[in-house]
Image (cartoon, helix red, strand yellow):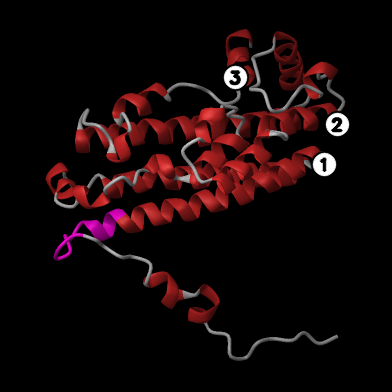
Amino acid sequence: MSENFDSALTYSSYLAVDELLNLQRPLSQGPEHDEMLFIIIHQTYELWFKQLIHEFAQAQRTMENGDTHYSLAILGRIRTILKVCVTQIDILETMTPLQFNAFRAYLSSSSGFQSAQFRKVEAILGRRDTRMAGHLPPDVQAEIALITSGNSVWDSALAYLAKRGHAIPTDVLNRDKSLGYESNLRVQDVLLEVHNKDPESSMVCERLVDIDEGMQEWRYRHVKMVERTIGHKIGTGGSSGVDYLASTLFNPVFKDLWEIRSRF
């Protein structure tokens, strides 16, 4: 059976390169040299957020299907993407406070807090907070509400462990997924058994710890980048800037996996 190929397809048309390269539209007069870097870095972040959403969805499917090896591959890819997100901050930090302030006023009310995709990433990872999307358009709020009504990545991981024969409490598996997960000593007891008796499942758990650490690392680097650039000024869009970002630090996503560290 022969396959049909588009002979007119080119590298440029497949990747929509022309359209992509026309999406950088500086607003400053000149424009200021560093505004281009600022735009490209943040557009790239949005592309990575899109890929993270895509990968997390697949990771949830593979874990809920009990597919250990594919889950490990996808979770490892997610961790690597997070490493790239952290490394991009190194590039952004080559821009000095004076260079940023040369075009900052043109950002007006726009702010990273308005990134719908990052809010979706947080929702997928288990954030259940009605305030997280209140400033976003109604259609985006509806999309995030749909995410928060279903399994988080941790819920999928618990389903994976149950499928592997581990005694995850039924009330935990069947809990209201629209509510935030609370640390559970019974789950922690099971996790200790997983690490001691099921090496494959423990590897999946450790991949989740890698991702959790990667998210925390990204948050920390983001905070320090903002602090070195604007100090403790109010952020664009009226956000509290560094003070809010700092409040998000050291809040693990997969709390039970961290709680058991002192019990090994």
- What is the x, y in percent for residue 158? 75, 27
**Cβ atoms at labels 1 and 3 below 8 Å apart:** no
Is 37 on the left-hand or right-hand side of 262?
Answer: left
Please tell me which of labels 1 and 2 falls first in the chain.
1
Quarter of the view holding residue 174: top right
**In what quadrant of the picture does the C terminus appear?**
top right
Which label sits on residue 65? 1
Q: In this picture, is 64 found above or below 181?
A: below
**Cβ atoms at labels 1 and 2 below 8 Å apart:** yes
For the point 50% across and 30% down, the residue is 213
Magenta span of residues: 28-38
Q: Which three-letter amino acid code belongs to the residue tagged 3?
A: Lys
Quarter of the view holding residue 245: top left
Badge 2: few (under 14), some or many (20 or more) residues near its Cα, within 10 Å? some
Is 3 on the left-hand or right-hand side of 116?
Answer: right
Residue 169 in view in this figure:
no
Q: Which three-letter amino acid code belongs to the residue tagged 2?
A: Lys
For the point 61% across and 40% down, the residue is 144
Residue at mark 2: 163
Q: Is residue 239 magenta?
A: no
Seen as rendered, the residue at the extreme front is 138
